[in-house]
Image (cartoon, rainbow, N blue to C red):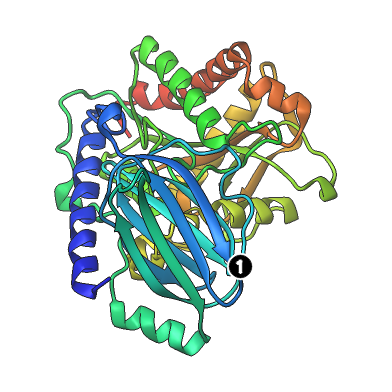
Amino acid sequence: MAVRTIALVCALSALLAGSAIAAERTGALAKPGGAADSLPIATDVRLGGDDKQTRFVVDLSQKIDLAAFTLADPYRVVIDLPQVAFKLSPKAGEQGRGLVKAFRYGLIMQGGSRIVLDTKGPVRIDKAFALAAADGQPARLVLDLVPTDRASFLRSIAQENRAPRAAPVKQSEAAPKPSDPRPLVVLDPGHGGIDNGTKAASGEMEKDLVLQFARTLREKLDRAGKYRVAMTRSDDTFIPLSERVRFARAQGAALFVSIHADAIPRSEGQAEGATVYTLSEHASDAEAARLAEAENRADAIAGVDLTAEPDDVANILVDLAQRETKSYSVQFARTLVGELKSKARLHKHPLKAAGFKVLTAPDVPSVLVELGYMSTKDDLKLLTSATWQGKTATAVAQAVDTFLTPRLAGGRSN
């Protein structure tokens, strides 16, 4: 595909992303697609070939436009599409073939979907095209890959110069301060869209569980009436890590709570219980370091290139965080652990710190909550229980109230 065509598609993608961010900022973000029945549908996917040439094919209900490009470290091929309803096998993408190790797919922004193929090494896109339905065959997306050397691979990336990503939110674009003086609590359900997060052996996905929990928590905070509540995502949409931080800062949030669920490889044994994390340049233990590294890969998983992100967002370190903000974050984390003791199972070391990118706002107290381990049967049973989610959300809401009430009394809104 010509570079000019790719640039036009990416420009449209950025415009769509900016519209989605603005809509979310006002709480008006609709469900993906609106009229889901009108979306193109991906009905089947397959890989063929070998290490000399690999073909990737997706069957579709109608012909669509596409833009395909490569990314390095790790080696990936990204295919950007209009919004597609993926009706594929639950295990689609888990097994690779030829030059492709695995692939994933999902919503990357309102109006746009993405497929990301992890490759075994540097590859060149030999062909990338779509076919209309004909002769009883469905419409198809076809991608042909051939191996190349790293130098050629990197040269190709530099020449194309077209890394698509959600348009940054400039401070001038931030919504005006609301007339409502109540403190704002931003809830951040982790992952979303193309980024599934952790997946349980029985098929449950982290992105779905944490979104449901965030909705439950939002209802409880709304019902109390003391706080305004916003969510970084309210549906199955991918939001870059830096945009989650920018969203909280642009809104003048009084508190930022990122919600996740952990998992550990079977070879590393078993762990259970909830953990609350604050930001630190130095992880409190090896497990905290492992988790932070895994969570910080979210943007790479979705094929988002962070190299062009503003330094004050993508590379903020703990030494740039305001001392007061860090202190407040730790204070809230301790309060939250105290409330969770009576309502949820806690990890043996429930209060930890690590270098999570999503906690790097220098002016918003921020914590990351791992609700439990999806790799542990008993924890998963709780995580999927509406009763447990309700009780645990009540505990988190109480911690929010305990933390923010003194600020309300003191006339501070954030």
Residue 234, image x and y in percent? Answer: 36, 30
- Quadrant housing the C terminus: top left
Residue 163, image x and y in percent? Answer: 32, 67
Residue 157 placement: quadrant? bottom left
The extreme front residue here reads: 135
Residue 55, image x and y in percent? Answer: 49, 64
Q: Is residue 265 left or right of residue 330?
A: right
Vertical position of residue 223 compared to residue 154: above or below = above
The residue that appears at 33% across and 56% down in the rendered structure is: 80
The residue that appears at 25% across and 31% down in the rendered structure is: 38
How many numbered discs sit on the rendered protein? 1
The residue that appears at 33% across and 40% down in the rendered structure is: 61
Report the front residue among 331 and 318: 318
- Quadrant housing the N terminus: bottom left
Kindly state the secondary structure of the residue where label 1 is placed: loop
Vertical position of residue 348 compared to residue 8: above or below = above
Residue 244, image x and y in percent? Answer: 37, 46
Vertical position of residue 310 compared to residue 161: above or below = above
Residue 362 appears in the picture as rendered: no
The kind of residue tagged 1 is: Gly
Residue 269 placement: quadrant? top right
**Residue annotated with mark 1:** 98
Vertical position of residue 203 compared to residue 3: above or below = above
Report the front residue among 29 and 51: 51
Residue 148 appears in the picture as rendered: yes
Residue 408 placement: quadrant? top left
The extreme bottom residue here reads: 151
The residue that appears at 57% across and 77% down in the rendered structure is: 52
- Label 1 Cα neighbours within 10 Å, binned few <14 / some 14-19 / many ≥20: some
Report the front residue among 340 and 40: 40
